[in-house]
Amino acid sequence: MIMKRIDFLAAILVFMPLFGSPAMAQFRTVEADRADTAATFSVDSVGAYIAYPWTLERCIEYARENNLTVKSQEIAKKSSEEDLLESKAAYYPTLNFSTSGSASFQNTSTYNEYDEATGKTSFSGSIGLNSGMTLYKGGRIRNTIKKAEAGYKASGWDLEQSKFDIEAEVISDYLQILYDNESLNLKIQNEKLSSMEVERAKTMCEAGSISKADLAQLQSTNASDKYDIVSARNSLSAAKLNLKQLLQLGMDSSFEVEFPTISDKDVMTSIPDLKTVYENALGNLPSMKSAVLSVDAADLSVKIAKGAFLPTVSLSAGINTGAYSGTGVTFIDQLNNKLGESVGLSISVPILNGREYKTSYNKAVLSAGQARITEEQDRNQLLSTLESLRNDAVSARSQYLASTEQLDAQKISYEMVSEQFNAGLKNTVELITEKNSLLSAQSKQLQAKYQAVLSMKLLDMYMNLEQSKTE
C-alpha cells in the first residue's frame, strides 16, 4: 500500500532536498552548471537543437504518462470494463446458429454389367437456430452487475493510486539528486578549505613554524577530502541513473536535471494539522476509496452466493430442419417439410449439491469480513504514516534551527582556531579537529533541512488530494 511505501521513503530519504527558493546559488557545482545545458531537446525555428534540463514537474508528468506500471494499471481498468459489459449482457437473450452435415457409404450385393460390386452413398444435413434467456436467477445477475461496477470503479482508483505512487517515487529520487548535489558542494568547499590550509602550512613549514609531520597530516587530510569529492560525485551520478531508470528512458537518452534552490522559508512552511490531513486523505486517497469499494464488492459476493440457493427460471426457443439424399424430394422442399419449432420453460431448484453452495456462501461471508479488516488496517496504516510524517517535520524543523545556531558558532570557532594556528598557538591536530567539526555541523544542518522539506512535501501530497471521479 502507498502508506507503507511513503513511510518507507520517509525513513530512508530523511536527507533529501525539495525545490523552490533563492539561497543556494553560491553552492552550485560543475554538475549543476552542466544541468543547464543538456537533458531534453527541442528544435527551434531554424532547426537547431536546444537542450533543456528535466524539472521535477516534467519528470512527474512524464512518469504519470509513460511508466509501465501505470500503463499496466490502465489495461487492468479496461479489463474491468469488459467484465462490467459482460455482466450486463446476462440480461439479454442468447442466439446461436448451428449446422451439420454427414456422408455415409454402404456396400451392396448389386453388380454392374462388368460384374463389379456397386455401393450406395447418402448425404444428410441439418441447420438450427436456438435462443435462451434467464428470467430469474435469485438476484445473482443484478448483484453480479453491481459487483462488476464496484470492481470497475476500484480499478479506476487503483490507476490513480499508481500515479500517486509513481509521483512519490519520482519526487524521492529527484530529491535524492538534489541532496547529493548539495552534499557534493559541501565536499568541494571542504576540500578548498583544506587546500588553503596545506598552502599555509607549507609556508609555515619553510619558515620552521611547524614540522614536516604536521604538514603531512594536513596533506593527508586534503587527499581524504579529494576522495570524498569523488565518492560524492559517484553518489550523484548513481542518483541520476536511478531517476532515469525510474522514468524508463533509453540508454541513449541524455539526462540531466534542473537544480533548484531552497531557503529557510521552505523549511519554515507551516505544518498542517494532523486531523485535517488525515480526514482529507481518508476521504480522497485513491487506495482508501478502492478499499471501500472492495468491501462493497465483498458484500455483493455474499448476496451472489446466497442467491445460488434460489431457483433458476430459464426460457428457451429454437427452430430446426434438415435434409437427406435419396428421398426423391428436393433439398428446399425437405427443409420446408422438416421444419420444427420449439419453445420451453425450465425451472431448476437446488436441493443437494454436495455442500457446494453452502461452502461458497460461508467463504463469501469470511471474505467480506477479511475485506473489512483490510480496510481498517489501511486506515490505521494511513494514520500511522501521517503521524510519522508530521512528527518528522516538527522534529526536523527543530533540529534545523538548532543546527543552524550550532553552525554559526562553529564557523566563528573555526576562524579563531585557524588564526591561532597561523600564529602558532594551535597545533595541526586541533586545526583538523575544528575543521571536521565545521563539516559535521554543515552536514547536520543539511540533513535536518532536507528532512523537514521532504516531510512537508509528502504531507502536501496528502493535503492536495482533490475530490474527483473515475470514469
Image (cartoon, rainbow, N blue to C red):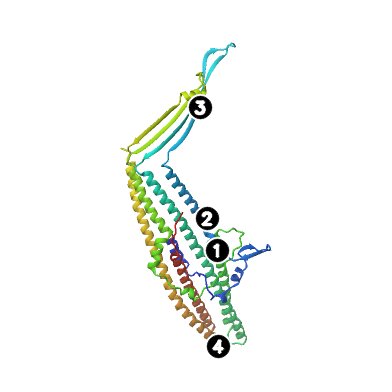
Comes first in the chain, label 2 or label 4 = 2
Q: Dot 4 corresponds to which residue?
A: 424
Comes first in the chain, label 4 or label 3 = 3
Q: Dot 3 corresponds to which residue?
A: 101
Label 2 crowding class (10 Å Cα cut-off): few <14, some 14-19, many 20+? some
Q: Can residue 160 be seen at all in this image of the molecule?
A: yes
Q: Could you give the CA–CA distance between mark 1 and mark 2, rounded to whole angstroms?
A: 17 Å
Give the number of the mark in front: 4 or 3. 3
Label 3 crowding class (10 Å Cα cut-off): few <14, some 14-19, many 20+? few
Residue at image x 44%, y 74%? 397
Q: Which mark is residue 58?
A: 1
Frontmost residue, 437 versus 85: 85
Q: Could you give the CA–CA distance between mark 3 and mark 1, rounded to whole angstroms?
A: 65 Å
CB within 8 Å, label 3 to label 1? no
CB within 8 Å, label 2 to label 4? no
Comes first in the chain, label 2 or label 3 = 2
CB within 8 Å, label 2 to label 3? no
Residue 454 percent across, percent down from the top left: 47, 69
Q: What kind of residue is marked 3?
A: Gly
Q: Can residue 11 be seen at all in this image of the molecule?
A: no
CB within 8 Å, label 4 to label 3? no
Q: What kind of residue is marked 1?
A: Arg
Q: Which mark is residue 68?
A: 2
Give the number of the mark in front: 1 or 2. 1
Residue 358 percent across, percent down from the top left: 32, 43
Q: What kind of residue is marked 2?
A: Leu
Frontmost residue, 107 versus 463: 463
The local secondary structure at tag 4 comes to loop
The local secondary structure at tag 3 comes to strand
Q: Could you give the CA–CA distance between mark 2 and mark 4, rounded to whole angstroms?
A: 64 Å
